[in-house]
Image: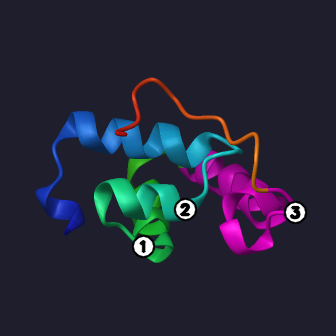
Amino acid sequence: MKISNLDNQTIDRIVEMAWEDRTPFEAIEAQFGLQEKHVITLMRGSVSVSSFKMWRKRVTTRNTKHLRKRGFTAGRFKSKNQKN
């Protein structure tokens, strides 16, 4: 899926999921078809420069944003807005 084809509601949901510490990039990819690099591009264009820098700093230090880096498998939070 291309970023340019996304509507505002979908972009807002992706940004929300990207900000959530416990939502991995793999969940965003499964739901919307966007790889991590595309989520980064989307975030860069959707939030302010300072917010993007803060988000990138948080994401790079969070193991929970990448399934392969997680130290746990159980206890994953699932938003009511997320697809089944």
Q: Position of residue 64 (x, y in %)?
A: 76, 56
Q: What residue span does the magenta drawing correspond to?
A: 49-72
- Would you place residue 2 above or below residue 75 in this image? below
Q: Where is mark 1, residue-wise?
A: 35
In the image, 38: left or right of 3?
right
Q: Are marks 2 and 1 in contact (CB under 8 Å)?
A: yes
Q: Position of residue 80 (x, y in %)?
A: 45, 23
Q: Hey, what amino acid is under mark 3? A: Gly
Which SS class for mark 3? loop
| Dot label at residue 71 | 3
Q: Where is mark 2, residue-wise?
A: 25
Q: Compare marks 2 and 1 and give the one earlier in the sequence.
A: 2
Image quadrant in which you'd find residue 58: bottom right
Residue occupying image coordinates x 59% and y 53%: 52
Which SS class for mark 2? helix
Residue occupying image coordinates x 62% and y 45%: 51
Q: Quadrant of the C terminus?
A: top left
